Each structure stands twice: as C-alpha cells, then as structure tokens.
Image (cartoon, coloured by chain):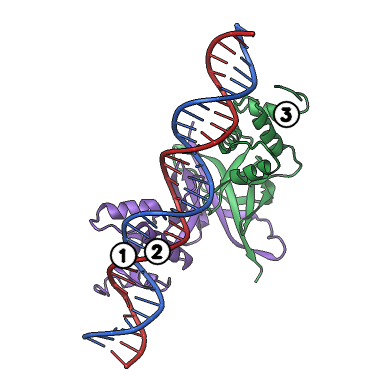
Chain colours: A purple, B green, C red, D blue
Amino acid sequence: MQKNNNKNKIFIDKLRSSGLRPTNQRVEISKFLFNRKKTFHFTVEELRNSMNLKRSKKISTATFYNTVHALKSAGYLKEFSLENNTSYYDTNISSHHHFFDNGKVIDIKSDKITFQKLPEAPKGKKIKNVEVVIRLENNN
Amino acid sequence: MQKNNNKNKIFIDKLRSSGLRPTNQRVEISKFLFNRKKTFHFTVEELRNSMNLKRSKKISTATFYNTVHALKSAGYLKEFSLENNTSYYDTNISSHHHFFDNGKVIDIKSDKITFQKLPEAPKGKKIKNVEVVIRLENNN
DNA sequence: AACTACTTTATAATTATTCTAAAGTATGTG
DNA sequence: CACATACTTTAGAATAATTATAAAGTAGTT
C-alpha cells in the first residue's frame, strides 16, 4: 500500500514508534486521534462508533483496542478511569488533571493546581505521578 | 428472625438508614464490612469470595451488589476506580486520598495533602470533592 | 396469624474487553 | 520487484464485572 506518505508522516511516526506497522486502519485511527487542535477524551467504544459510522468497511473492535493500547504504552495517550468501569483515554499526555462533571471530562492544566504539602512515598517506592480529579455538581 | 438485636445494632442501623431492611444476609455483610479496626478496601467480587468461602449457604451475587450500592449511596462506603474496570470500595468515608501501587491501594489521610492553588469550578457548577491518586513505582 | 411490600436467589442478559485462528498485508532480502 | 515471513485484521467466541428478571421467601404492620 503505502500512499500519502508525507501527508500522514506524523501519524505514521507515532505508530512506528509504538512498535506498530502503519497499516491503513492504524493510520486512520492515528489520524483521527491526533489530527485535531483540541484535546480529545474518549473510550475505545466511542472511538470505534464514531469512526465506523462513516465507513462502509468497518474497522474491527480488536484493531481499535490493539492500536489504542500500543499508543498508550508508547506514551501517546493517557489512560484514566472514572466510576463506570470503562477506560478513558486522553490525547493530552502532558501532566494535567481533570474536572469530572456527570460523565463529562474537562482538562485542567497542570499549573492550575499546585500543592502545599504532599506525602512521601513509602520506603522503596517513589512517586510516578499525581493525579487530581475534581468532581463537580450543579450550583444548588 | 430478628435475634442479636443489641449486638448488631450499629450494623443494622447502617442498613436501615440506607433504606434497607436488615435481613440476615445484609446484617452479615454490614458486619463483615464495618466490624473492623482498620479501613477496608475491596471490590464486590473480593467481598463475595471472602464471605462465601466460609459459608455453606452462599449469599447471592446480586445481594452483594445491592447491599454495597445502597451502603455507598447512603454514604457509608466510598467508591473509586483504578484502571482495571472494576469498582473499588473503601470503608473509610472521610475525605482522603490514595496511593496506588501496582494494584494495591493505600489510604492517605486528608491532612497529608494540601493545595496551594485550585482552579475555580466552571460557572453554574461547584466543587463536590477533590480526589488525589498518587501512583507509585519501585525506587530505581 | 395474615397480608403486602420488600428480598433473595439462580439464572439470563449486558457491557467492556480480550482471545483465537484463519485469511490478508507490510517489509526486508535477494 | 517478487518472495518469504512475521506481523495484522477480522469475525466470532470467551471472559469478567455488573445488572436485570421473575419466582419463591421473609420482614414488618395490622
């Protein structure tokens, strides 16, 4: 295959450095995820539905899961969990936090939250990251 | 039925104020959860396994889920999620935070973390709670 | 003691996710 | 540039956590 090499270079590079061959399906997924201005929050099922809706030839579920996992392992996606037993992914991989409002997720830039005091890691351990979720409710 | 009223009063009271009749199964669950010194972290499946292991007559899965949900809605349990698509519950309902170390959860007392700066809630919203997860990794 | 609404239970259904194995494709080598 | 080979895709089955169902049982009121 291998067309539109230049146009899709950055999306292909993300796949390659995630250890994935840039197949058509994967390039489309990578493009869908990263070819946007704003941060994108999604579950794998949401991603699958929105991409497959427009397509006559559907990409299989397994391919979505495989690709998202590899991109996440390579650090191109951030995973987080809310209380509905589903994994969420975020194309914003910079350290940051989240508002969580009734199923909706909103990014909080890292510098909007700073700590006065943080506990030390138990001995033998060190802190990998600190994640804050601010849950919202309606103003009365 | 209705025996050992006094002995189990506090466990029965939690059920009642969660809107649940104190049936035998529920009283046993309530007791198992709250009759302990230290905070208890669990998933419903773990709870079910450890309680049913010792019993000849098993309590059904649905009863565990129903009871835990009601106790949680009433505020006697705190729910939280990690990245494995399972709900965790915590008998420590005071506002607090967690270390998360390779599947293991450790409580962090609320006063061990304080903020220098927190963002404002979007308009029309207010902050319900702030939850911090500190992920750990091995030292080197 | 009887009635009624709430419970329990086994089992089926659902949802998110992972596995499997057969058919297809990217890529290095000659 | 054709080939071989290892990696991919796919549909469908399998698994895990959870929720729904509906028949049989029980708490609590009268």
For the residue pair B78 and B30, the one nearer the viewer reads as B30
Name the residue that disc number 1 marks.
Answer: A25
User: How many numbered marks does the figure carry?
Assistant: 3
- Residue D11, placed above or below residue D2: above
For the residue pair A33 and A99, the one nearer the viewer reads as A33
Please state, as top left, top right, bottom left or bottom right, where the C terminus of chain B lies in the image: bottom right
Amino acid type, label 3: Ile
Read off the chain for label 1.
A
Q: Earlier in the sequence, mark 2 or mark 1?
A: 1
Q: Are marks 2 and 1 on the same chain?
A: yes
Q: Give SS at disc 1.
A: helix
Q: Residues within 10 Å of mark 2 (few under 14, many from 20)?
A: many
Q: In the rendering, at what x and y percent does residue A121 appear?
A: 68, 60
Read off the chain for label 3.
B
Q: In the rendering, at what x and y percent does residue D8 appear?
A: 36, 69
Amino acid type, label 1: Gln
Q: Find out whether the residues at labels 2 and 1 contact each other: C-beta distance under 8 Å.
A: yes
Read off the chain for label 2.
A
Name the residue that disc number 2 marks.
Answer: A67
Can see residue A76? no
Label 2 to label 1: alpha-carbon separation: 9 Å
Q: Which residue corresponds to the image point at 74% horizontal and 28% vertical from the top-left?
A: B8
- Residue B50, placed above or below residue B24: below
Residue D2: which quarter of the image? Answer: bottom left
